[in-house]
Each structure stands twice: as structure tokens, then as C-alpha cells.
């Protein structure tokens, strides 16, 4: 089998790991492909490289293909999300001025209670808090909005500003933003540089939020089904490899290379282990499944996840209110996931939609090959999202 090189765009984040590991640990080579991994300076660059054919695939914010199908963002190329690359992995943090005010109230940065954190943040803020986020169409934005709508912060308590992840700490230090929501390791970088503290993992808002997807152009999926299958199997096997805690040190060393994330391997290991340093004073917190690559059918693109994202986008964007939600939901390609990963031994759920927020504990469910273990899937306000409700 001749090796085929596939150009793939990514942002330097911990959740690009399945692509980097697929290339570095030989999972791509075993499928007869090589990944030419191209780092991008911003999420708009990743989107444009994929949409305009500079690359064949991309590490992509899960909300981007959904937003594009709803006519948001000005680029209309049809994209498909064929696998979820990661669940969770983001942090909410505050700059030094807000950190000092929070400490003055006795707040202990417990890193677990979204309601308490919002209450205290609302108490110490003297106007809308300017939050930096990596892109307008992202889980960062939608989880922030979901959180503030249901807490003391309220819908007018936050102003959202776009900042590329590697520049988040610098924007905080410059006073351009008061707080941020960003993927690791860039929250830890702010802590290490002494310009901020971590307030919450976004997993405390939605415990099983689809964060990044493997995205391709829909026409490429139709013309290159064999290459697509090879790419999907390589990244899925890399995610399965990453699920073993014994390999985290090796993974951190690989990801930390100058050619990839170019940051301390120790900071990357924090995200992989869920053992985070949340303040410059050295306060540490453990978060179970801070980022998940494999367990609980993590890679499966549930159409109910896409529908949740579409509904949130409708709430936030006037121009999206008339969009075809069914069409936007279909960009999560559970059909292609079943087609290309069933042969690899990937556990497949029997359905392609579920009640989001309804699984309180680890649950055994019927699956295509027998049974499948799903992980807790809770919203902090205990709401349940039924994808069948209009």
C-alpha cells in the first residue's frame, strides 16, 4: 500500500493530541497515510484552510460545522464532523484584579461549583466582565452563555471578545480582557505567568461536552471514502492509546515539542491527568476526566450534541433563528462513523441521538455489538435536552 500524505490543520491545544499521536506513534503509518500537520494561528485560519481546500481535514471546534450549516460566519462550504476528537478540556479563568477581589470575599477557588463561582463573581464585578474566547462559534461561548443565563451573572453580565488561545495570557496581562474561557494548556500558561487564576473547568457546566471534532469537506468525504476511513481509524486508535494513563508522560513529551505546542511538558501533563494548578500560589485541584479522548463512546458524533449546539446558536444569533436545524444537526456524521470505524472494533451505540444531560452515573446501554458503557452526561442546572422537542 502506497503511503498517501494528507495535509491536516490544527490549533496548538491539548485536544489536538489524537492527530499528533496518530502521526508520531505510527497509527497513521499503519493505515498507509502520513499526516502533514499544519499549525494555524487562529480558528478562522483553520476553518478557511479546510473550506478553501488548503488541507483535507482539520482539528475543529465542534460548533463551527454546525454554525456554517446555519449560515453563520460568512463561509458556506459544507463540512462534516466525522468523529469527536475530544470531550471537555477547557478552563474558565480570571485575571489578577478579579482574582484579588474574589480572594477578598474568602473564595477558595474550589474549581467545582459553577453556581457559587458565578455568585461570587457577580458580587465582586462592577460591570460586565470582558471574557476572552478563542472563536465566536465554539463550545467556549455556548457554555459560557449557558452558565451566565442560569446564574447570578445574568445575560448582561458578560461581554465576549475573540482572542487566539496562545495569546490569551498576554491579553489578560494587557488588560484587554478580564477573564477567559480557553482550552488547555493556555489557562495553565496564564497561571504560570502570574497573570490569572483558574475558576472552573467547563466540564463543571456540562460534564460530557463535545469539544473538538475531526472535520472534512463533505465533498471530499464523498470522493475519497477510502482515505477518510484510514484517517478516522488512525485518529480513533490514537484516542484509545491516550486513554491509558501510563502513556501520559510519553504523550506530554511528544506534544510539548517545538513543532507542536512548544510549551512545558509538565503543563500538558496537568490536562491529561486532570491534576491542575489553579493559582500562582500553587493551589491544586483534581478533575476527573478533565479531557476525554476515548471512554464512553467519546468519539461518536451524536446528532443530539449537534442539535444542542444549533439550539444554543439560535438563542444567541438573530440571523440563525430561521435556519434549518435538521440540516445543521446532520453535519455530525454518525453514519460515516459507523461505516468507517465499525471495522476497527469501535463501540457503536444503537441510536444516533440521546437525551443530553440525562445520564447521572456511568451506565451500561445496548450497542451494535452488545453493550456499551456511557459516562455521566450532566448539565450543572440538571436540565435535560430532548432533541425531539421542537
Image: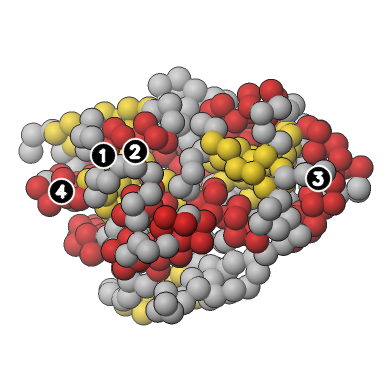
Reading the image, the residue beneath label 1 is 51
Separation of marks 1 and 2 at Cα, in angstroms? 6 Å
Along the line of sight, which residue is nearer the eye, 66 or 105?
Answer: 66
Q: Is residue 178 visible?
A: yes
Q: Nearer the viewer, residue 11 or 47?
A: 47
Residue 263 image point, x, y percent? 54, 25
- Whether residue 275 is visible here, answered yes or no, is no
Q: CA distance from mark 4 to mark 2?
A: 15 Å
Closer to the camera in the image, 189 or 388:
388
- Label 3 – label 2 distance at C-alpha: 35 Å
Q: What is the quadrant of the N terminus in the image?
A: top left
**Disc 1 and disc 3: Cα gap in Å?**
40 Å
Residue under circle 4?
219
- Locate residue 32: give its quadrant: top left
| Residue farthest to the top, as pictured | 258
The colour scheme used here is secondary structure
Label 3 secondary element: loop
Q: Is disc 4 in contact with disc 1, using a CB cutoff of under 8 Å?
A: no
Q: Which residue is mark 2?
A: 47
- In the structure shown, which secondary structural element does the residue marked by tag 4 occupy? helix
Q: Are marks 1 and 2 in contact (CB under 8 Å)?
A: yes
| Residue at the spot 42% in from the left edge and 62% down from the top edge | 321
Residue behind mark 3: 125
275 displayed left or right of 84? right
Residue 275, horizontal then vertical, whole percent: 65, 44
User: At numbered mark 2, what does the secondary structure look like: helix, strand or loop?
Assistant: helix
Q: Residue at x 38, y 49 (%)?
A: 72
Amino acid at each position: 500500500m502506497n503511503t498517501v500524505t494528507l495535509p491536516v490543520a490544527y490549533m496548538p491545544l491539548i485536544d489536538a493530541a489524537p492527530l499528533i499521536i496518530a502521526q508520531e506513534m505510527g497509527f497513521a503509518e499503519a493505515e498507509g497515510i502520513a499526516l502533514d500537520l499544519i499549525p494555524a494561528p487562529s480558528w478562522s485560519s483553520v476553518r478557511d484552510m479546510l473550506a478553501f481546500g488548503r488541507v483535507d481535514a482539520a482539528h475543529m471546534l465542534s460548533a463551527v460545522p454546525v454554525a456554517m450549516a446555519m449560515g453563520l460566519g460568512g463561509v458556506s462550504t459544507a463540512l462534516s464532523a466525522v468523529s469527536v476528537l475530544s470531550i471537555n478540556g477547557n478552563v474558565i479563568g480570571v485575571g489578577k484584579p478579579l482574582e484579588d477581589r474574589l480572594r477578598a470575599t474568602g473564595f477558595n477557588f474550589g474549581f467545582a461549583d459553577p453556581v457559587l463561582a458565578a455568585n461570587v463573581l457577580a458580587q465582586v464585578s462592577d460591570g460586565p466582565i470582558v471574557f476572552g474566547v478563542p472563536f465566536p462559534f465554539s463550545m467556549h461561548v455556548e457554555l459560557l452563555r449557558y452558565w451566565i443565563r442560569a446564574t447570578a451573572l445574568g445575560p448582561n453580565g458578560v461581554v465576549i471578545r475573540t482572542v487566539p488561545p496562545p495569546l490569551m495570557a498576554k491579553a489578560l496581562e494587557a488588560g484587554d480582557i478580564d477573564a477567559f474561557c480557553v482550552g488547555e494548556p493556555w489557562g495553565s500558561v496564564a497561571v504560570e505567568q502570574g497573570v490569572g487564576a483558574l475558576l472552573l473547568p467547563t466540564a463543571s457546566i456540562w460534564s460530557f461536552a463535545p469539544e473538538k471534532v475531526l472535520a472534512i469537506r463533505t465533498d471530499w468525504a464523498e470522493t475519497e471514502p477510502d482515505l477518510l476511513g484510514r484517517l478516522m481509524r488512525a485518529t480513533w486508535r490514537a484516542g484509545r492509546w491516550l486513554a491509558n494513563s501510563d502513556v501520559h508522560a510519553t504523550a506530554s513529551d511528544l506534544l510539548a515539542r517545538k513543532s507542536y505546542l512548544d510549551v512545558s511538558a509538565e503543563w500538558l501533563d496537568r490536562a491529561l491527568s486532570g491534576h491542575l494548578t489553579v493559582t500562582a500560589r500553587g493551589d491544586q485541584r483534581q478533575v476527573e476526566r478533565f479531557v476525554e479522548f476515548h471512554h464512553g463512546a467519546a468519539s461518536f458524533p451524536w446528532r443530539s450534541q449537534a442539535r444542542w449546539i444549533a439550539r444554543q446558536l439560535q438563542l444567541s444569533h438573530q440571523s440563525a433563528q430561521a435556519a434549518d436545524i435538521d440540516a445543521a444537526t446532520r453535519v455530525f456524521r454518525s453514519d460515516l462513523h459507523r461505516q468507517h470505524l465499525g471495522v476497527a472494533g469501535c463501540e457503536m451505540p444503537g441510536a444516533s441521538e440521546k437525551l443530553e444531560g440525562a445520564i447521572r452515573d456511568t451506565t451500561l446501554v445496548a450497542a451494535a455489538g452488545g453493550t456499551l458503557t456511557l459516562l455521566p452526561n450532566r448539565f450543572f442546572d440538571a436540565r435535560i435536552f430532548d432533541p425531539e422537542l421542537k
